[in-house]
Each structure stands twice: as structure tokens, then as C-alpha cells.
Amino acid sequence: INQPQVLLLDEPLAALDLKLRQHMQIELDRIHDQVGITFLYVTHDQGEAMSLSDRIAVMNRGKVEQIDKPAALYEAPRSSFVAAFIGDTNFFEGTIAATDGDYCTIQCTGFPAIRAFNDKNLAVGQRVDLSVRPEKIRVTLNPPLPEKGATINVFPSTVREIVYQGVYTKYWIQSGDLRVATLKPHSRFLLDQESITWNDKVYMWWHPDDGYMVESK
């Protein structure tokens, strides 16, 4: 009993405060490496799962939607459920309006057309949902200056909501009929940066490679 092949852990850190929970995540990872057995860890905390796991199984209504490495789940989800469940994301629904080599143009519902990497090789007329993570989206007061030869998505927008989180600020940006969530990390001393505030007219932009297609709902 003291040397099992598999150790089952059912939300072992749920009752702990944030700092202690973070410390215990490191301690559990150390114990796992030391004893060298499989840990089967159940949690509803996506961040906890991402930080502890070698592989994650995401379940929906009793069925496994995807089993993969944390980075693959986050960057390349197989379904809209996985994309929404692991971290935050923005969904843009639309139809393939044109294709151009490895890229395509998505004519969106309630939002301007978006250029995206066509990793699914979809044809004109097919429905698609595009997932774009908040941290992939930049928000600036001035229009961006893309690198030579680069084509990026740029949308004039309006700031609707702001939540300061210390490490980053989360903005909800209105463009067309949609509110889009974005994250701005505070990589420099915040008080030295040009501030963006409520109702500012801004530019929201991201590279076509930074969106990921999932099946249409």
C-alpha cells in the first residue's frame, strides 16, 4: 500500500489558500519526480492542471474530448469545448470567404472579416469558428506598423471594460457587434506607460497565425 503503481488524487489542494496551493503544487511535482509513479489528479482548476500535468484529459458530459500535453490543449484544441474550458478565448463565427495558399479570409457574423491560417484546409463556403486567445491580441492607441511583407488583422475598436490584475490588465474591446477580451502584460513599470482607459478609440490587432480553427458550433 505504501508503494502503489498509481496514486489517485481527488482535488487535494481545493481547501488551501492561494499561496499555500501554489507551494504545494511545486511540492507535489517534486514528490512525483522522486517516487516515479503515475499520479491521476482530478481538478476543476484549469491552471492547476496545466502547471502539474504531463498529459491532461478534458471530459465533457462523461466523454473524453481530448487527451494531450498542456501546451497542445491550449494552443491546438480539437473542439470549441476544449478551447473554452482550458483558459480564456474569443470565438469568431463565420464562413470561409476566400483562400490564399495556407491562409484564408473568414467572413464573420457581427465582426469584420478576419485573415487566418487555414490549418484545416477548409474550402470557400464552409462554416468555421476561430479561437483567438486574449494574450494573442494587442491593443494600442496608434495603428500598428507591421513588419515588411507581414499581413496582420487590424480592427479600429472602443474600450468598454477594464480590469487591473497586477501582472496584466484585461480589456474588453468593442468592434462590430462583438466584445473581445484582450490581455496587456505589464512588462515595464506601468506608471511610465501610456494609459488606455474607458471609451478610448484603440486598434486591436493580431497575426493570422495566432488564431486556431475549431469545428463550427
Image (spheres, rainbow, N blue to C red):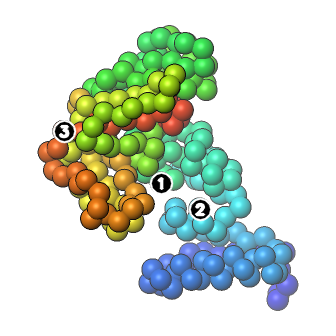
Q: Please give the residue where the numbered disc 1 appears in the rendered image.
A: 87
Depth order, front residue of 11/179: 179
Q: Foreground mark, 3 or 2?
A: 3
Could you tell which of marks 1 and 2 lies nearer the N-terminus? 2
Between the C-alphas of marks 3 and 2, the distance is: 35 Å
Q: Residues within 10 Å of mark 3 (few under 14, many from 20)?
A: some
Q: Residue 43's spot in the image, x, y percent? A: 55, 68
Q: Amino acid under label 3?
A: Lys
Q: Please give the residue where the numbered disc 2 appears in the rendered image.
A: 50
Q: Please give the residue where the numbered disc 3 appears in the rendered image.
A: 201
Q: Amino acid under label 2?
A: Met
**Residue at the location (35% across, 65% down)?**
189
Q: Is residue 128 visible?
A: no
**Residue at the location (56% across, 75% down)?**
11
Q: Is residue 176 visible?
A: yes
Between the C-alphas of marks 3 and 1, the distance is: 27 Å
Q: Residues within 10 Å of mark 1 (few under 14, many from 20)?
A: some
Could you tell which of marks 3 and 1 lies nearer the N-terminus? 1
| Quadrant occupied by the N terminus | bottom right
The answer to whether residue 172 is left or right of residue 61 is left
